[in-house]
Image: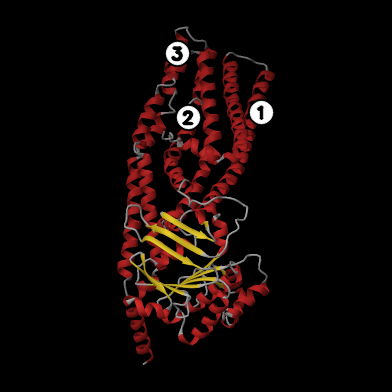
Amino acid sequence: MEQKQKSPIMRIWELGESGHRQLKTAIILAIFGVLMGIIPFVCASCIVTELIEGEGSLSVYIRFIVTGCAGYLLNTFLYVGALGISHKATFRILKEIREKIMKKLPKLPLGTIMEMKSGKLKQTIVDQVESMETTLAHVFPEIISNFGGFFVVWILMFVTDWRLALLAMIPLPVGLFLMSASMRGYADNYSKSVEITSAMNESLIEYTGGIEVIKAYNQGDNSYATLKNRCMANASFFYNWMNRCKTNIYAMIIAPACLLTVLPFGWLFYIKGSLSFSGFVTSVILSLCLVGPLLAIMDFVDTLAKLGTVVGNVDSILNAKEQEHITSEKYVECGNDIELTGVSFTYEEGAQDVLKGVSLYMKEGSRTALVGPSGSGKSTIAKLIAGFWDADSGSIRFGGIDTKDIPLEQIYDKISYVSQDNFLFDDTVMENIRMGRVSATDDEVIACAKASGCDEFIKNLENGYDTRVGGGVHISGGERQRIAIARAMLKDAPIVILDEATAYIDPENEAVIQKAVGRLVEGKTLIVIAHRLSTITDADQIVLVKDGDIEAKGTQDELLAKSSLYKAMWEAHIGAKDGGAA
């Protein structure tokens, strides 16, 4: 049976579980605060009544004034205390939600994360989670307490004169009707605003990230036009939306106008003798604070309306399907030989399979090269082995144990993955290398940098190993790859995957890098993907991948003898190499 979907307000209460105790305390304080806030109005009505009735004792007025001031002060202190507690709980909850999201992301298939556009991902994790602050810190204590305050005031009016209590409510539905007109479709409009803002953010990220290409191909006008159009669409949408909400102004004027009914009818009841003067004054003064709590609640209507979109976006990450691996802190004993049996995989559900029943065995300590035409599935095989995705069907085994029976964290620890596009964090060179093993000492980091042939160029940077790279200092693609190799060396994992890892190496540094790679893979189970076939001739096994399946496998000589496709690829490579040398 399909589980009933929970309301956004209940879901956000679940997300804030760690702060329930403090939020409940804040709600109780806020309720008492609102009740204390009613006392000055009651005292004011008593003072006016006593004045008109000619009471001459100063002590009577002092008693009401002191009581009213005490109520006002208690209202202030309790309200401030409630908000202080709720805010402390809220910021801890926001931290917890972000931690849940960040812990969730590594458990998702790489494809799921890649499908999440960076602009929308940032907006969800940073902006939309932050927007929950109003709901958690204000909505729960203030809505509940203000509802309580409204009913207490209305009951006091009802006890004083039930007719005026009912008449005082007439302007409220009129104001709510006008407000409902402006709020109609709010959730859809807010969802659309998120979509438009995300599109604008994505254009901004694309424009700044691709500025080099834009300048190189003189596409500044066209690229800026896209960004400008999306910015204008964003501004136009919000302007038109706010313009449609102008009836909300009339609602806020009419809803609190209780005196329009209480004053004339109260006077009529008084002169007719059916209402005492003190009852008339009390009803008038209480009517002044009757709708105030409800108006305070109305301020949160837009927050509650957009909450569904916010919670939906957060849950789209938190409830996303994880990879199917056991979760255990216990280490699973397994070897480093790798076996694929009938592995099929597609990146998008319903699309054509990228891999079609691939079966392959790689002995522990052996060197396997994956080659084949572009798009044949080589990198997909490597990434499935690395645990970036789960196979749709078939199995992948390490030492005879299905990878689904091995925790993802252990698989990640077991494999060093070096690709042609290596990401460097906006941090120092030292810390970027140390990502391979965060417990490594500086001496261990430097030793790996020397072994990977990047110590010399690092020392020539402005601040040496303390130079920030990634988001600041520009370094070449070859230098990035050497840092990535040093990072992999430091990790010292038993399985190494090199996905075009020497693609950017310039000829004068090729020998240095090949030596570095040799040190990296020494004694390891190696899987290498390379277009430069001359670099993998000594592999124990060369696997030719074509159209998502294994076309042929064997040593260099065996493939040259039995595979026309491999022979053609080899001759094309040697011809290109000789042509380049010429």
SS for callout 2: helix
| Rendered image: mark on residue 294 | 2
Q: Which residue is mark 3?
A: 163
Residue drawn at x 54%, y 26% as measured from the top left:
149
Q: Which residue is mark 1?
A: 70
Give residue 44's position: percent from left, percent from top. Answer: 58, 23
Side of 63 where 272 appears, left or right? left
Amino acid type, residue under disc 2 in the picture: Leu
Give residue 146's position: percent from left, percent from top. Answer: 53, 29
C-alpha separation, residue under disc 3 versus residue under disc 1? 31 Å
Q: Residues within 10 Å of mark 2 (few under 14, many from 20)?
A: many
**Is residue 532 in sight in this rendering?**
no
Amino acid type, residue under disc 1 in the picture: Ala
| Callouts 1 and 2 close, C-beta under 8 Å | no
Extreme-bottom residue of the structure: 582
| Callouts 2 and 3 close, C-beta under 8 Å | no
